[in-house]
Amino acid sequence: MKRTIFFFLFASMLLIAQAASYSGTLPVLFIQTENNQSITSKETYINATYYLDAMGISGYTSIGSKESPLNMEIRGRGNYSWTGFDKKPYRIKLAEKQPLLGMNKSKHFALLAHADDSNDRKGFMRNAVGFELSKMIGMTYTPNAKPLEVVLNGDYIGLYFLTETIRVDKDRVNIVEQEDEETNSDNITGGWLVEIDNYDTDPHVTIKEGGKTTMWITYKTPEVLSYQQEQYLTQQMKLIDNLVYGDKNSNELWNYLDMDALAKFYIVQELTDNYESFHGSCYLHKEIGANEKWHFGPVWDFGSSFNRDKSQYMYQGDVWHNHWIPEICKFPAFMTRVKEIWNEFYNGNYNNIYSFIDAHESLIAQATVKDKARWPQYHGSQTISTYIDRTTNVLRNNAAWLNQQWKTSGNTGGNDNPGGNTGGGDNDGSLSELTSMYVWVNGQAVEYPVSQVDSITFAKKEGIVVKVKVPEKWGTDIYVYLWDTEGVETGDYKASKQGDWYVYTYFGKSLNIIFKKGKGWTGDVNQSEDLKTNRSGCYVITQEGENKGVFNEVDCE
């Protein structure tokens, strides 16, 4: 009996070990801490060794080896991502600068776990897409982040993203590095890297935003302030705050803030609907010189992105309090510049983001399977492709909504050009995928040329377009309520009007929705039964008394 139990336990452990192993499709970083110590502190580094195995994958170079590992230090990092998950993020400091994964040589990197990204069914996309949009729109510096797999003390700990940390450096935030405890009045005018923070535990100065809300400004460089430095930083932030809450037709604010940098930073946050973007992890920097301006950036944390239907600006609804930006958006000069940059970007290279997403998915697909075997509690039952499709659809809808708000007379497309649609953001710009769509006619899937279909129903062939006529008594303001097969609710989406039809376009492989009158859950009144489908179609809803509305499929002609 004991042998049987032992064999069972041994076999179980062997199966777990086999399941929780790296994929071989990404480089693997092997880390061994001194004396096999656990990493328990965010403040104190512990000694370790490492080597990077490129696994023979083209485009990567191995660094160190199992026989000759290199020295490093490692500690925890993050706030909620550190305390809320067993899959932990880390900060690493190499003994010597190395070009890990082909990045610029440095000692300083982060290993981001993005457990919350998989846990929220976002397909490890939030930072990846946010960073890429930042690069595409032309932010001065955006951290590089590349996927790899990690083995820590012999334990496979999953898919991680090796990420450049934000620091003053010629290859990162390229400004003069201000000395700690500097007192010279000329030298303290620049070399600043600070963060609008949502934690008061880090070294910071404090102001009252608009005379009311506490605002923490954490200083990263310099790290230790003299009295003169503390006064300068505090006075600068108070001056900007006074101007933000002052005359909206004045241009004085732009003597202190770089308008273009802020406009680009803001557009990226709106595209991702990052409703925590001006609340925390919001960086600013300033070069030395009395006349130098503060620049917003680099971008960093997109952990609160892609969570909502885009029916308002990211700072509205105030899930978190966003500092300054609600007031700054009241400046006509700023919003004029936002629209100029948006239209240039949207008509230019914006559509390339969808090619990036496709490449991102291909790169990490096999590693996500292994990550799921190691951390099943942070993954749903569906494939990475399903979650990436869902998040991509949110991005498309975000872009469409923003283009409705910001489109100018000179806007000829972005997604309105051939390779896009007039709704904006509902396709990836591939002409071959926009020539037709399928709808159900007389029991057959009929391919419709786009010239015969109203612009709002452009879709990839594998996408789904649902057109519905609701009971006349429902009136207007019809919403669709969408969830996936796991019961994960993705919320209310305003159904677009097209003549007598309400239309909803979805880019997943299947969907489960109801149509209803009014936003929010209202029970059975003015609400349809579940419509579960994996193809496009047209439906008429009928309703008797207080019962749910019933779907009847009809020809789309």
Image (tube, rainbow, N blue to C red):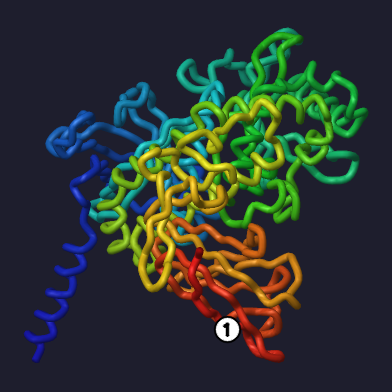
* 30 shown above or below 414: below
Can see residue 517? yes
Query: Percent x, y for residue 504?
Result: 56, 61
Pick out the residue farthest to the right. Answer: 247
Asked whether 123 or 6 is in front, the reply is: 123
Query: Percent x, y for residue 433?
Result: 38, 45
* In the displayed structure image, the side of residue 162 where residue 67 appears, left or right: left
* In the displayed structure image, the side of residue 194 where residue 38 appears, left or right: left
Query: Percent x, y for residue 350?
Result: 51, 33
Residue occupying the point 51% across, 43% down: 43
From the image, tell me which residue sits under label 1. 550
Residue occupying the point 53% across, 31% down: 134
Asked whether 379 or 151 is in front, the reply is: 379
Number of numbered discs:
1
Other residues around mark 1 within 10 Å, as few (<14) / some (14–19) / many (≥20) = some
* 329 shown above or below 33: above
Residue occupying the point 60% across, 47% down: 398
* 63 shown above or below 289: below
